[in-house]
Image: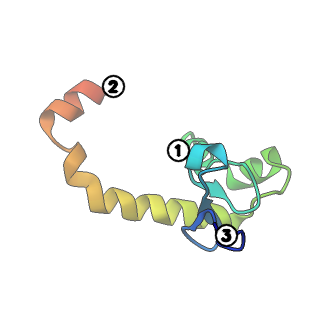
Amino acid sequence: MDKNKLKGRLIGRYIVSDPEICHGKPTFRGTRIMVSHVLEMVAEGISWEAIIQEYHGNICKEAITEAVNLANLAFLEHAQEYTAPEYVLEHATV
């Protein structure tokens, strides 16, 4: 195998997926910070500045913006899969 080939996949400017890092889950480029963890923090209402501090400046506002935008695109593309009444009832947290 060509060692110069990119092992991972570039998802965006700041987000990558590499099977050898975090089991291929999307991470922020050059880190092992999983995008899903940051998105959970955003969903919990934690300020972006606090998230950046939590990760010692290893991610930036632009990286978080990219993660939120990509999550939004994924939601819009797949939303119908999750709006069935059974799914809503099974996963309701209210």
Disc number at residue 94? 2
Residue 14, percent across and down?
65, 68
Give the mark toward the camera: 1 or 2: 1
Residue drawn at (56%, 42%), measured in percent from left and top?
Answer: 40
Q: Measure the alpha-carbon separation of dots 1 and 3.
A: 17 Å
Q: Is residue 27 left or right of residue 77?
A: right
Disc number at residue 62? 3
Q: Earlier in the sequence, mark 1 or mark 2?
A: 1
User: Mark 1 sits on what residue?
Assistant: 43
Circle 3: element type? helix
Q: How many marks?
A: 3
Check if mark 1's residue and mark 2's residue have beta carbons within 8 Å: no
Amino acid marked by disc 3: Glu
Q: Earlier in the sequence, mark 1 or mark 3?
A: 1
Give the mark toward the camera: 1 or 3: 3
Residue 1 falls in which quadrant of the image? bottom right
Residue 27 falls in which quadrant of the image? bottom right
Query: 10 Å neighbourhood of mark 1: few (<14), some, or many (≥20)?
Result: few
Amino acid marked by disc 1: Ala
Residue 55, percent across and down?
79, 48
